[in-house]
């Protein structure tokens, strides 16, 4: 196998990736929830199933959005 450096003396990409160390540590505690996690949780409360297919139909999706906006538990 050849040298880990290119002609300019710089490390190759795979060398940078394998030897890289992070600057900081991860924060303590539970990871923050993503936006999509919250959307899926809201859709479960409204009891919408197969929502990924319903997104394709604009009118159906607008009806679902209005239904979730007026839902008392959200």
Image (cartoon, helix red, strand yellow):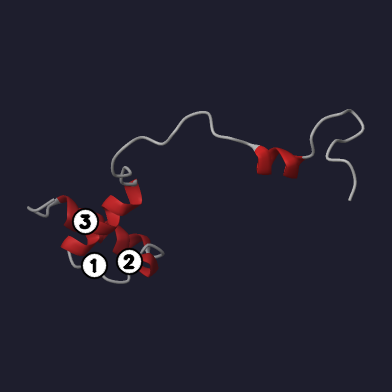
N-terminal-most mark, 1 or 3: 3
Cα–Cα span, label 1 and label 3: 9 Å
| Position of 9 relative to 69 (above/below) | above
The CA distance from mark 1 to mark 2 is: 6 Å
Q: In 3D space, how far apart are the residues under numbered discs 2 and 3 (Cα atoms)?
A: 11 Å
Whether label 1 touches label 3, CB < 8 Å: no
Residue in front for this viewpoint, 66 or 42: 42
Foreground: disc 2 or disc 3: 3
Q: Which residue is mark 1?
A: 48
Q: Name the element at disc 2.
A: helix
The dot on residue 70 is none
Q: Locate residue 44, reporting x and y percent.
A: 21, 63
Residue 73 point in image, percent of width and height? 9, 53
**Badge 1 density bin: few <14, some 14–19, many ≥20, Cα 10 Å:** few
Q: Quadrant of residue 41?
A: bottom left
- Tell me whether the residue at label 1 lies in contact with that at label 2, contact meaning CB atoms closer than 8 angstroms: yes
Q: Quadrant of residue 31?
A: top left
Measured as percent of width and height from the top left, residue 40 is found at 28, 58
Kindly identify which residue carries mark 3.
Answer: 42
The residue closer to the viewer here, 56 or 51, is: 51
**Neighbour tally class for label 2: few under 14, some 14-19, many 20 plus, Cα within 10 Å:** some
> Taking 24 as reference, is 46 left or right?
left
From this viewpoint, which residue is outermost toward the left? 72
Looking at the image, which is closer to me, 21 or 70?
21
Query: Element at badge 3?
Result: helix
Report which residue position mark 2 lands on: 51
Query: Camera-side residue: 64 or 72?
Result: 72
Q: SS for tag 1?
A: loop
* Label 2 or label 3, whichever comes before in sequence order: 3
Residue 58 position by quadrant: bottom left
Identity of the residue drawn at 34% across and 47% down: 34
């Amino acid at each position: 196998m050849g040298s880990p450096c290119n002609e300019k003396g710089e490390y190759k990409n795979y060398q940078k990736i394998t030897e890289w160390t992070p600057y900081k540590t991860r924060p303590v505690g539970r990871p923050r929830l993503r936006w999509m996690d919250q959307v899926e949780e809201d859709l479960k409360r409204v009891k919408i199933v197969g929502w990924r297919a319903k997104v394709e139909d604009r009118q159906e999706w607008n009806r679902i959005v209005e239904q979730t906006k007026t839902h008392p538990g959200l």
